[in-house]
């Protein structure tokens, strides 16, 4: 499986047959979409959105963390995968989660992933300017606690590009 850093590679997903992703709209005309999330609240929201925006599309939505994909789906069952809004940031064992994603992707299938990165200087400055130093430097800590859309507090970790590349290299061609 391949890992790409740029969003221009998103389009090939919708030219394939089976895709793990969450967008709804005209792009999914020819795709069978399987959307997963570890949060029951997010799955409920996705199901509501799918029924409203894509009622006639082939969309399956299930509660499933990335690390559980290989347990729930056969090997090489997806033509691509798209992980957005930082799910790897919330995985206790991101290497195991990435290995699980790699097992369910067909050989050469693309995998797009976004993570919450280390903070930018403007974020640090804003935190300091508002006298909230803990918030200014929270993404420099090994882990921080965040409220995951009503699923409760979870540990989250921010990655630098180098850390992410090293993490991905164990399961993907980077």
Image (cartoon, rainbow, N blue to C red):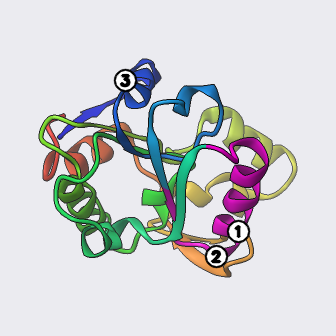
Q: Are marks 2 and 3 in contact (CB under 8 Å)?
A: no
- Neighbour tally class for label 3: few under 14, some 14-19, many 20 plus, Cα within 10 Å: few
- Inspect the magenta stretch and tell me whether residue 55 lies in it: yes
Where does residue 38 sit, x and y in percent of width and height?
A: 52, 72
For the point 38% across and 25% down, the residue is 15
Where does residue 59 sit, x and y in percent of width and height?
A: 54, 52
- Inspect the magenta stretch and tell me whether residue 105 lies in it: no
Let me know if residue 157 appears in the view: no
For the point 17% across and 45% down, the residue is 106
Which residue corresponds to mark 3?
12
Q: Are marks 1 and 2 in contact (CB under 8 Å)?
A: yes
For the point 62% across and 26% down, the residue is 26
Task: Give the extent of the magenta segment.
Answer: 35-56
Q: In the structure shown, which secondary structural element does the residue marked by tag 2 occupy?
A: helix
* Front in this rendered view, residue 112 or 154: 112
Considering the image in quadrants, where does the C terminus appear? Answer: top left
Residue sticking out furthest to the front: 56
Task: Tell whether 70 sits left or right of 26.
Answer: left
Q: Answer above or below: position of 20 versus 133.
A: above
Task: Tell whether 99 sits left or right of 38.
Answer: left
- Secondary structure mostly taken by the magenta-highlighted segment of the chain: helix
Q: CA distance from mark 2 to mark 3?
A: 29 Å
Q: In the structure shown, which secondary structural element does the residue marked by tag 1 occupy?
A: helix
Q: Answer above or below: position of 3 versus 76.
A: above
Disc with the residue nearer the chain's start (2 vs 3): 3
Q: Splitting the image into 4 quarters, where does residue 43 fall?
A: bottom right
Q: CA distance from mark 3 to mark 1?
A: 27 Å
For the point 26% across and 76% down, the residue is 71
Q: Which mark is residue 99?
A: none
Let me know if residue 118 appears in the view: yes
Residue sticking out furthest to the right: 130
Which residue corresponds to mark 1?
44
């Amino acid at each position: 499986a391949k890992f790409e850093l740029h969003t221009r590679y998103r389009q090939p997903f919708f030219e394939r047959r089976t895709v793990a992703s969450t967008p709804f709209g005209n792009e999914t005309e020819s795709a069978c979409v399987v959307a997963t999330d570890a949060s029951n609240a997010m799955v409920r929201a996705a199901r509501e959105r799918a029924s409203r925006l894509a009622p006639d599309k082939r969309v399956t939505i299930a509660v499933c963390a990335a690390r559980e994909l290989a347990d729930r789906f056969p090997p090489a069952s997806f033509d691509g995968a798209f992980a957005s809004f930082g799910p790897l940031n919330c995985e206790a064992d991101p290497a195991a989660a990435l290995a699980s994603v790699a097992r369910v992707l067909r050989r050469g299938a693309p995998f797009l992933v976004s993570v919450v990165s280390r903070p930018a200087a403007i974020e640090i400055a804003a935190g300091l300017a508002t006298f909230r130093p803990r918030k200014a430097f929270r993404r420099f800590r090994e882990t921080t606690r965040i409220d995951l859309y009503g699923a409760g507090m979870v540990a989250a970790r921010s990655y630098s590009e180098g850390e992410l590349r090293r993490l991905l290299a164990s399961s993907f061609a980077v």
